[in-house]
Image (spheres, rainbow, N blue to C red):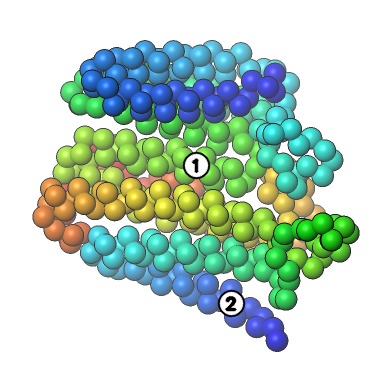
Amino acid sequence: MGNMLPLFIALPLAGGFLAALGARKSSLAGGDVARVMALIISGCLLVGSLALLGRESCVYWIGGWPSPDASTVGLSLVCDGFTQMLLVTVNAIGFFALLYSFSYIQRFTGRALYYCLFLILLSGMNAVVLSGDLFNVFVFMEVSVIASYALVAFGVERQELEASFKYVILGSVSSLFVLLGIGLLYNLTGQLNMALVADRLAGIETGPAVWLAAGCFIAGFGLKAAVVPFHAWLPDAHP
Amino acid sequence: MTLGALPYILALVLMLIGLYVVVAKKNIIKIILGVCILEYAVNLFLLLLGYRHGGAAPIRTAEQADTSAFAAGAVDPIPQALILTSIVIGLGCLALMVSLAVRLHEKFGTFDMTRIRELKG
């Protein structure tokens, strides 16, 4: 089953770039093709995530680095019980949001670009859920979040631009906090693989550096998730 | 000569300068510059984490057959790889921010955030 995991990232990413190609042709036909493609891909991902549900957890090593010390250099995709639940959540919400957006997006031009951004967003979110490596979480979080900045500004009207600009600034600052926390954890443990970081952290004393890393993660992911003290951008970005 | 914790403290001071610019300035261009300063400060901090005083560049040649001796004398390459990725991501973000600033100037005719206020948040 592990070999299926990269498809959750590769399929929507490929679809997104194909949809972007469609935007260059006459926008109406390109938009229709991109819509059908987005629907098929999103549906496949939903079915795939449901098929993974309740199976044994599995690990996929990107590029095939399964040697004993691969953990220090290899990147992994991990699918355990919690990942399965979140994959179903992400893909189900993505699929139904896509169904809803069919009529909503009709008022805009350049619809193929909307489906391009939507698929890249979906790919980034799936990758964040699946990734077993701290730095990959950061990279794919940025992939999904940059797509969502562009989606917030999609209509390019006054209010959308203002909301998107606030979101970009707060989002960039929070990403940098997450990056700082990852750097601190790497310095403490010498690892980027999540399982090994957890192992090493259990072995060392909880000093101020661990609390600083935890604070960076709470501030960074809290700003992204709009948890209460950091929620100011949310009502503007999602009117 | 070792500098102790001084480089880390300076990187954190640079980070605070970036945060101050983002929070306190009203001009869109200055806010974007503040995000850039913050980004460079975080990158610098990561680079310092992997730095070893007097360490060799982490490029292994054919003469250095002993891996563990090489690893003991070289700087840590992983933070450098992380910085490379984060610089590229930062460039993408910067391009998006600047294009938004251009569009905002088209619509509002100003770079002043206090005059771009149609939303309540």
According to the image, label 2 marks what residue? B7
Q: From the top left corner, tell me how far across and down residue A88 is, in percent.
A: 54, 21
Query: Which quadrant: the C terminus of chain A?
Result: top left
Q: Chain of mark 2?
A: B
Residue A50: quarter of image: top right
- Foreground residue, B91 or A93? B91
What residue occupies the far bottom of the structure in this picture? B1
The correct choice, above or below, for A125 with respect to A50 in the image is: below
Q: For mark 2, give the secondary structure.
A: helix
- Foreground residue, A140 or A84? A140
The correct choice, above or below, for B28 with respect to B20 in the image is: above
According to the image, label 1 marks what residue? A141
Residue B70: quarter of image: bottom right
Q: Chain of mark 1?
A: A
Q: For mark 1, give the secondary structure.
A: helix
Q: From the top left corner, tell me how far across and down residue B61 is, in percent.
A: 78, 58
What residue occupies the far left of the structure in this picture? B109
**From mark 1 to mark 2, how far is it between C-alphas?**
29 Å
